[in-house]
Amino acid sequence: MTKLRHENGLKNIAQLYGELVANGLKENAKLATKFDEYICDFAYGDIYSRNSLSLQQKQLVTISSLITQGCVQDELRMHMHGGLNAGLTEEQILDICVHCLPYVGFPRVTNALKTAHDVFKERKK
């Protein structure tokens, strides 16, 4: 079972982020032994492998959740890239940010919008 979890996790990571996260996982492994495996196997091998939501919907939920947390710009940036790779449009990502406004406030949404614009610029290089 563990090997299948890991393989599914790597597949989902590659589909959403390509090398962006593959390199990040290697860095996480330097911070704490097996941390990269926890992310790969649990988050992407178990949770992202569930079939009731599409990959786009999963990224929409994840982006929204990260916006509500605030102060997680690196994670938000990564998942915005993943959302675009899963088929979300730039307009949809901006609308996700704006939709969070009444629930989390201007500072968090302003930061999320800045992050979104940075991601859009990065992808046009």
Image: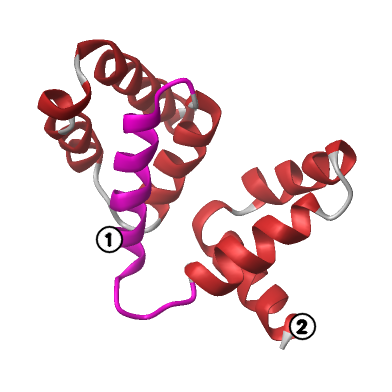
Dominant secondary structure, magenta: helix
- The kind of residue on which mark 1 rests is Gln
Marks 1 & 2, CB-CB < 8 Å contact: no
Q: Quadrant of residue 4?
A: bottom right
Name the residue located 55 percent from the left edge and 67 percent from the top edge: 12
Left or right placement of residue 96 versus residue 8 in this view: left
In terms of secondary structure, where does tag 1 sit? Answer: helix
Compare marks 1 and 2 and give the one earlier in the sequence: 2
Q: Quadrant of the N terminus?
A: bottom right
Disc 2 on helix, strand or loop?
A: helix
Q: Quadrant of residue 18?
A: bottom right
Q: Of the residues shown, which amino acid type is indicated by label 2?
A: Lys
Let me know if residue 60 is in the magenta part: yes
Which residue sits at x=40%, y=40%?
80
Query: Which residue in the protein does label 1 denote?
Result: 57
Q: Residue at x 78, y 41 (%)?
A: 28
Please name the residue shown 20% across and 38% down the image.
Answer: 96
- Which stretch did the figure color magenta? 49-71
Q: Residue 31 location, x and y as percent?
A: 85, 36
Residue to which mark 2 is pinned: 3
Residue 10 percent across, percent down from the top left: 66, 67
Q: Is residue 121 part of the magenta span, yes or no? A: no
Image position, residue 118 (x, y; %) = 42, 21
Q: Residue 106: x, y in percent?
A: 20, 12
- Position of 111 compared to 94: left or right? right
Left or right: 124 as drawn, with respect to 30? left
Label 2: few (<14), some (14–19) or many (≥20) C-alpha neighbours in 10 Å: few
| Disc ID at residue 10 | none
Q: Is residue 104 above or below residue 85?
A: above
Q: Pick whichever, 80 or 29, lies toward us.
A: 29
